[in-house]
Image (cartoon, rainbow, N blue to C red):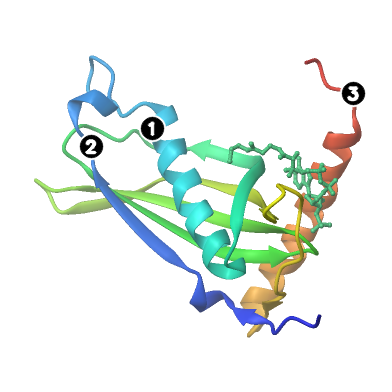
Amino acid sequence: MVMQPKPRSESTVTMTQIVLPYHANVAGNMHGGEVMKLMDSAAGVVAARHCLSNVVTASVTQLSFIEPIFVGDLVICTAELTYTGKTSMEVYVCVKAEDLERGIIKSVSEGYFFMVALDRNGRPREIPPLLVENEEQQLCHDAAQARISQAKQNKNREGKC
Ligand SMILES: CC(C)(COP(=O)(O)OP(=O)(O)OC[C@H]1O[C@@H](n2cnc3c(N)ncnc32)[C@H](O)[C@@H]1OP(=O)(O)O)[C@@H](O)C(=O)NCCC(=O)NCCS
């Protein structure tokens, strides 16, 4: 079956969350794991929107925490599709934090999430291709291909567990 390509704009999502004390350590810094959970959720929404099926996270790369996030900040997490393979896709996730007392927004985290679409039996299933609409999206797509090759090489190496 030939699947119709879908543009990035059909799946892009922005999710927000206020940082509460239970998201943070005793000094008021948001836990990295809480940030990653929000990023993973946003990547999952993008992937599910694109392929309209169950999706799982296969791997994450180039995840970085650039600036701290504090209790009371509004976390703004934007996720967008950069690449599609046969059954897998890459989602770029960018996180900003807004200091609601000062009205300052800063970039705090980013990363690339590889997601795989699954059928009802939990096996990888084919997905619609991404419709690349401009030069910027083509550059993102090309860069993603290099990361995918790296992820495949990493997967083929013997793991420790
Ligand atoms: C991800 C998973 C479905 C891949 O299964 P698999 O049998 O290895 O699948 P395949 O080798 O046929 O690969 C399927 C696709 O996934 C990609 N893939 C597999 N492992 C990957 C990895 N570690 N990183 C990036 N992509 C990966 C492959 O490149 C392939 O992409 P393509 O079809 O676009 O070329 C399987 O490893 C899994 O279920 N992992 C657990 C996922 C999970 O529980 N995540 C956390 C909760 S959401």
Disc 1 target residue? 34
Which amino acid type is shown beneath numbered disc 1?
A: Glu
| Mark 2 in CB contact with mark 3 (< 8 angstroms) | no
Disc 3 target residue? 158
| Mark 2 in CB contact with mark 1 (< 8 angstroms) | yes
Tell me if residue 149 comes above or below residue 6 in the rendering. Answer: above
Disc 2 target residue? 19
Q: Residue at x 23, y 17 (%)?
A: 27
Element assignment for label 1: helix
Who comes first in sequence, dot 2 or dot 1?
A: 2
Q: Nearer the viewer, residue 139 or 88?
A: 88
Q: Residue at x 68, y 82 (%)?
A: 5
Ligand 1 location (quadrant): top right
Who comes first in sequence, dot 2 or dot 3?
A: 2
Element assignment for label 3: loop
Question: Callout 3 environment at 10 Å: few (<14), some (14 to 19), or many (20+)?
Answer: few
Element assignment for label 2: loop
Examine the rendering and report whether any part of residue 109 can be seen. no
Examine the rendering and report whether any part of residue 29 can be seen. yes
From the top left corner, tell me how far across and down residue 9 is, in percent: 50, 77
